[in-house]
Amino acid sequence: MQYVIIGNSITSIGCIDSIRKHDPEGSITVIGEEKHPIYARPLISYLLQGKTDEQKMTYRDEAFYQKHGVQVLTGRKVEKIEAQEQLLRLDDGVAMQYDKLLIATGSIPFIPPMKNLEEVERRHTFLSLSDAKDLEADLQPTSRVLIIGAGLIGLKCAEGILKRVQSVTVVDLADRILSSILDEEGSLRVQTHLEQTGIRFHLSESVREFCGQEALLTSGKVVGFDILVVAVGVKPNIQLAKEAGLAVNKGILIDQACRTSDAHIWAGGDCSEGWELLSGERRNLALLPNAYMQGETAGYSMAGNEQRFDNAIAMNAIGFFGLHIITAGVYQGEDLCFTTESGYKRLFIKDHHLVGCILIGDQVLRGGIYTDLIRSRTDLRTLDFAMISEQPALMAFAQKVRSEQLGRAQ
Amino acid sequence: MKRIYVNEQWCLACHLCEYYCAYANSGLLDMVQALKDKPLHPRIQVEQKGTVSFAVNCRHCSEPLCLKSCIAGAISQKDGLIVIDQDKCVGCYSCIMACPYGALMPSESGVMQKCELCATNSHGLPVCVQGCPNQAIVYEER
């Protein structure tokens, strides 16, 4: 059996882990476009911040690949998938046969059209290790940095570089920061915290035009800058899949076993669009835990031991300068709000189920208990909801449930 | 593999497990020196309400959501034991987001910590279990 994985990141690791639980023999080849061995991509902002280094960023070491008998080709690009022939064409013209293929091509930066963007010389994106290194090489203590995008990527970038430059200014089209994961109150709290560190925001704004080292905003304001980082968001990298004739929407369409429309091809991670629990629809969830679990699910299926990943939800853990945030699920239904001086919590309840949560500051501890209530679709009438809404604790569960939680064999 | 299991009907809410845990992971040989006048950062925590109490620590899940969610690749599974490499951890709280038991928490330095069954400190066997006066936590194969 010849397994081939396109993409050398988290989804690929999940896939290798599960293939090897059932098939110790089949050959596994990973093809990665980047020159680096596998690394923890979300750590690039921590690298610039000095909280990690390239060696520590190694997501799995060389021994992992040796133990699992995996061949990794780095710095190599797949040009074409010939699905009929079960064949890949690589950049050097080499053809590679596969029996089972996983597409884990991740996402690519989304760059909205902005007038004269191409004329900005010191222009960066912030997604890969080489992006981070390019940006780092460009930074100077006197640099004024303009970041387009107040989402997860833009703000982590801001945190990573703030101490190394003269100023950081963030522009976003939305009227608040982190609008994809926070409610208004949450956004405001985090924005206040970030402003205290010196980061400046221009919200409900976009760049009308770049003129030399100035950005003209839609309101007429002018922001001077030396370095530009475009971090508006990402989009699924589906080029290869699309050209191969696979069913795609925004991402590559997959079922709960991570199969694509081709019987020999699976997909997972940021490039895919799989079933999301709470909507009952396919969603592109470009999140690390989802990437691992889709890769893992695909690997089980590829090795002939099909399992279903049927409880994917959106969930994020992120922090800025010591203020931590955990969010999960959807923000629908009735809500409960708890506010403390250094924290904020909002729970969303629909038809006796917890469907979403926003936890900030001192409210994040043990937050996984809430996430689990959402993922497991626990009926809130089976537990002491007044207690658990105040504080996530196993005490709120029925004694029988708890003895199972803390006493069952794993 | 052997794991720590909880018999909540025997728990006295004495919190000794927390003290023993903090001591065992302090790296110090003397318990008084390890604990006196210091903030405790135990990896096992007692929940208590009315007459009910029990200790919670890592379950060492066979399908560890913390490992699958770790953005740094800092959490690994070795013969069933889930361990965290604190040098690699950047303190992003993804494991806290993922753990259904609330069994990981920030350490004094801000990176995450978890129960490693005392297999990675100098004690070798879970010190909380040895220190529990009423066998409310046990270390056994199930």
Image: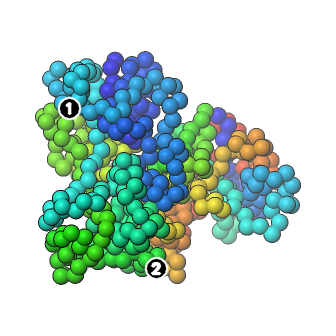
Assess disc 1: are there few (<14), some (14-19) or many (≥20) residues with their C-alpha within 10 Å of its C-alpha: some
Decide if residue A29 is on the left or right side of residue B127.
Answer: left
In three-dimensional space, the C-alpha distance between marks 1 and 2, rounded to whole angstroms, equals 47 Å
Q: Residue at x 56, y 38 (%)?
A: B77
State how the image is colored. Answer: rainbow
Residue kind at label 2, given as amino acid type: Gln
Tell me: A354 left or right of A88. Answer: right
Does B118 sit above or below residue A336? Answer: above
Q: Amino acid at mark 1?
A: Glu
Element under disc 2:
helix
Q: Residue A2: x and y, percent?
A: 33, 20
Labels 1 and 2 in the same subunit: yes
Q: Residue at x 67, y 55 (%)?
A: B43
Judge by depth and name the residue closer to the eye, A36 or B50: A36
- Nearest to N terminus: mark 1 or mark 2: 1
Residue B30 percent across, percent down from the top left: 86, 55
Tell me the quarter of the picture where residue A158 sits.
Answer: bottom left
Instruction: Determine the residue positioned at 19% across, 75% down.
Output: A216
| Chain holding disc 2 | A
Picture disc at residue A79: 1
Chain assignment, label 1: A
Considering the numbered disc 1 on the image, is that residue within a helix, a strand or a loop?
strand
Residue denoted by label 2: A196
User: How many numbered discs sit on the rendered protein?
Assistant: 2
Of A349 and B29, nearer the camera is B29
Position of the N terminus of chain B by quadrant: top right
Counting from the top left corner in percent of width and height, residue A83 is at 17, 26
Does residue A292 show up? yes
Residue B103, percent across and down? Answer: 59, 55
The residue depicted at 16 percent of the width and 26 percent of the height is A82
Q: Closest to the observer: A3 or A31?
A: A31
